[in-house]
Image (spheres, rainbow, N blue to C red):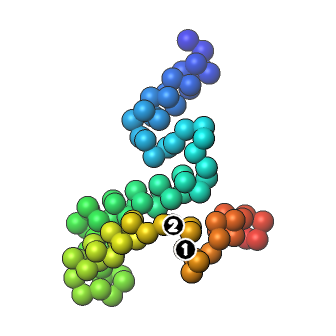
Amino acid sequence: MTDRARYGEALSTMKDKYVALGDDNTTSEEWLSNVHRDTYNLMMHSSALLEYTSVASGSQSKFETRLKLLEKMKAPQFNNPDKRKFEEYTDVSKK
C-alpha cells in the first residue's frame, strides 16, 4: 500500500471517529465553531480545568462556571454582533 493510500485511509478513519472534523462541505466557520464547543465541553467535564477556569475568571463556584460555559456552547459563535466578524478573526495579514 502506498503512502498516499494509507494517508487517505487514516483520514477517513479519523473523520468517521471524530465527527467534528467535518467533511468537504464544512466551512471554516463551522469547523472553528465546533472546535470552540468541543473546548467548552472539555472544560466543563474536567474537574481540574473547571476549577482552574473558575479561579481564573473570578467566579464564586464551579457550578456558576459550568453554567457560563454551557451558555457559551449554546450561543452562536460568530453570528453575535458583539463579537468580531469571522473574517477579522481569521485574517492573518493583520497580525
Residue 1 drawn above or below residue 26: above
Residue 46, percent across and down?
Answer: 26, 62
Query: CB under 8 Å between callouts 2 and 1?
Result: yes
Q: Amino acid at mark 1?
A: Asn
* Secondary element at image label 1: loop
Marking on residue 77: 2
Residue 7 drawn above or below residue 50: above
Where residue 13 sits, quadrant-wise, is top left
Residue position marked by numbered label 1 in the rendering: 80
Question: Does any portion of residue 6 appear in the rendered image?
Answer: yes
Residue 28, percent across and down?
Answer: 61, 52
C-alpha separation, residue under disc 2 versus residue under disc 1: 7 Å
Q: Nearer the viewer, residue 10 or 66?
A: 66
**Residue at coordinates 48% horizontally, 66% vertically from top-left?**
76
Q: Nearer the viewer, residue 28 or 74?
A: 74
**Residue at coordinates 47% horizontally, 35% vertically from top-left?**
15
Residue 17, percent across and down?
Answer: 39, 35
Q: Nearer the viewer, residue 23 or 14?
A: 23
**Residue at coordinates 22% horizontally, 82% vertically from top-left?**
61
* Secondary element at image label 2: loop
